[in-house]
Amino acid sequence: MSEALTLDGVSKSFGGLKVINDVSFRVPEGSRTALIGPNGAGKSTVFNLISGVYPIDQGRIQALGQDITGYTVPQRVRHGIARSFQNIRLMPHLSTLENVMLGEHHRSHPLQLVGSARATARARRALEDAGLGTYPGQVVADLPYGVQKRIEVVRALMAEPRILLLDEPAAGLNSTETKDLRLLLERVSGQGITLVVVEHDMPFVRHLCNHVVVLNFGSKIFEGSAESVSRDPLVLEAYLGSAQVMEGGHA
Amino acid sequence: MSGYLSGLLAMLSINVVVAYAVFMPASAGLLNLGVAGFVLLGAYTAGALTSLGDWSLAPALLAGAATAGLIAFLISFAILRTRGIYMVLATFAFAEVVAGVLLNIPSLGGAAGLSVMAYAGLPVVVPCAAAVVLLMVWLMRTRFGLAVRALHDDESVANLFGVNLRLTQVVAFTIGGAIGGLGGGLLVHQFNFIDVQSTGVLFSIYVLLYVLMGGTQTVWGPLFGAVFFTLVPEGLRKLSELDPSLKFLEGGRYMVFGLAVVLLMMWRPQGVITRTLMEALLPGRSARRTT
């Protein structure tokens, strides 16, 4: 299986603090890869480096066969990388429909009417596919948290990405919403889109993902299958601490 | 129509035009306290062309708008490097520079101001205001308008979905400058006169207030703000004439008006016309439309 995404020796510092330290990993094309680790491990920073929010200090990033290290943020979305955010970052003063339409901005003409029948139908269909068909006209700031969280995913999907980065998509969702989200992401994965998911909800990760990368203190400590991650001693130590591991604890 | 009413309608139309000059960049999150500079550029360009160059009114108005737009484009690269209060100060400083330059050009009247013969009456001013409103409504319904509003909310996320930050901001600022120039052209030809003192910082503050009070979330906010700010002081003055017990309003109307502004800022700091209000007034509307 070829790689959708490759990080090769990537490092990033903020001031004197090295938050990502020589991280290399591969995301197989079409896989559902989880990027996990304790708080402060650098997971969201890796997303910011892949999506171009921060430039990397060292190393290189390849996506879909091209070196994207020097690409601007809009170039990366045009290349097929879209993302959602750990904290909801919808446009609070725009309607649900407009937020979703923003996702396809990179492939639209500036003078194209946002409310055209085709664009509206496309956005409505995407919302309905995610079970959000009842909210198109509402200003997103007025919507419940769980709905906003899923609108973010729909917005990213509207970009028609080939690599979808999801930063804690299940955070704050109830069990029904989490299950609906997982089913949606499985359908998305079925369309050949590579998923990279940062998530703390381990049952969600176990059900959804088939490939796992674990970070701790900005370094990669594990890369492999979802089945083997919970048996890895370094991962157990990162999550539980060395004393608990010696006593036989589990992640 | 009486001279008073036609004068009031003309002033309202010009205020609407100038309000949209501030709204365009404001809707992208760019606060412009230098609209007086663009108004002066448009006014002096159009005024000089009709009075000194014997141009007819329409091309002179267009030239005034184009000149202000061109200057807005040129200065946008420097001004857009600033943010927040620094942008407010930078645009204010720009207007002061324009005023200073114009004061020192004797052929344009200097401190005595510029008088013009050509007159822009209601048949010119009202359609121009209507055209600006329609242009804004259309623009805000395009992908460009969506990008502008997205920038207002979150530049970084807008950029992640392909919005070109700098280009969108430059275009918004340039369009705003050009509309300000058009407003200036209309102003000088409505009053047959313009001078630097009457279009100073207070003018810029008032127009910014129209927009912020009206609201920048929808295209209708500046229209509401301009109508409110133009008609309420006049309404208070009229009341003082009609009812002797309200005589205090003749001099005190600005106090009442100022109090209204403070209360509005406390009650609705986001402006009177918001997306949520529009959705409440016209349910289902924003599912079909986007302004």
Image (tube, rainbow, N blue to C red):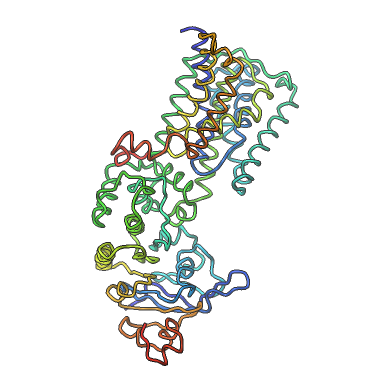
x%, y% of residue A40?
49, 73
Please say if B190 is above or below A132.
above
Please tell me which residue is depicted at 62% across the width and 30% down the height of the picture.
B36
Residue at the far front in the pictured view: B245
Q: Is residue A119 left or right of residue A105?
A: left
- Foreground pick, A238 / A183: A238
Image quadrant where one finds the C terminus of chain B: top left
Looking at the image, which residue sits at the far top?
A: B2
Residue A147, image quadrant: bottom left
Q: Residue furthest bottom?
A: A246
**At which x and y percent is residue A204?**
30, 72
Pinpoint residue A184: horizontal percent, then vertical percent: 26, 63
Q: Which residue is drawn at 36% across and 36% down?
A: B278
Between B254 and A187, which is closer to the camera in this rendering? B254
- Which corner quadrant of the image does residue A57 belong to? bottom right
Depicted A6 relative to depicted B220: above or below: below
Quarter residue A155 falls in? bottom left
Q: Which residue is drawn at 63% across and 73% down?
A: A16
Give the total number of marks visible in the rendering: 0
Residue B113 pos. (x, y %):
69, 19
Q: Is residue A165 visible?
A: no
> Is A122 on the left or on the right of A145, as rendered?
left
Compared with residue B280, is residue A159 higher up or lower down, i.e. above or below?
below
Name the side, left or right, on which B275 lies relative to B230: left
Tell me, yes or no, if residue A181 can be seen here: yes
Task: In this rendered view, identify the residue nearer to me: A70 or B236.
Answer: B236
